[in-house]
Amino acid sequence: MAHPTPHPHIVVHSPALDGSRRVTAGDETLGIASHVDDVSELLRLADLYVTDVEGTDLIEWQGGGPDDWPGLSEHHDV
């Protein structure tokens, strides 16, 4: 039986001054997110399919959780 490929350590870093957050997988920067949906898209583009970015233990949220986007919340329609 084949073992599943382990995910790299995924980190959503603390918000920058503009509220955006850098997303990394191991030593690789995947991109900059301005909303939790951006995190999902960056992971998808990196072939790291995580279906529940808000509830998974695969992602380390630094400086706040998936609902913390200071300075950017007024830019997205809910």
Image: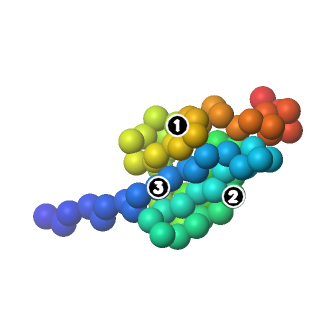
Residue toward you, 30 or 1? 30
Closer to the camera: disc 2 or disc 1?
A: 2
Q: Which mark is residue 10?
A: 3
Q: Residue at x 80, y 39 (%)?
A: 72
Relative horizontal placement of residue 32, taking residue 78 as reference (left or right): left
Relative horizontal placement of residue 21, taking residue 73 as reference (left or right): left
Element on which disc 1 rests? loop
Amino acid type of the residue tagged 2 in the rendering: Ile
Res. 2 image quadrant: bottom left
Q: CA distance from mark 3 to mark 2?
A: 13 Å
Element on which disc 2 rests? strand
Q: Name the spot of residue 67 as percent of width and height, x first.
A: 63, 32
Q: How many marks?
A: 3
Amino acid type of the residue tagged 1 in the rendering: Glu
Q: Name the spot of residue 62 as percent of width and height, x first.
A: 53, 43
According to the picture, the residue beneath numbered tag 2 turns out to be: 32
Relative horizontal placement of residue 9, taking residue 22 as reference (left or right): left
Of mark 2 and mark 1, the one earlier in the sequence is 2
Q: Residue at x 54, y 66 (%)?
A: 46
Of mark 3 and mark 1, the one earlier in the sequence is 3
Q: CA distance from mark 3 to mark 1?
A: 13 Å
Establish if 36 lies above or below 13.
above
Which quadrant would the C terminus be assigned to in this image? top right
Q: Residue at x 86, y 38 (%)?
A: 75
According to the picture, the residue beneath numbered tag 1 turns out to be: 54
Which quadrant would the N terminus be assigned to in this image? bottom left
Q: Residue at x 50, y 53 (%)?
A: 11
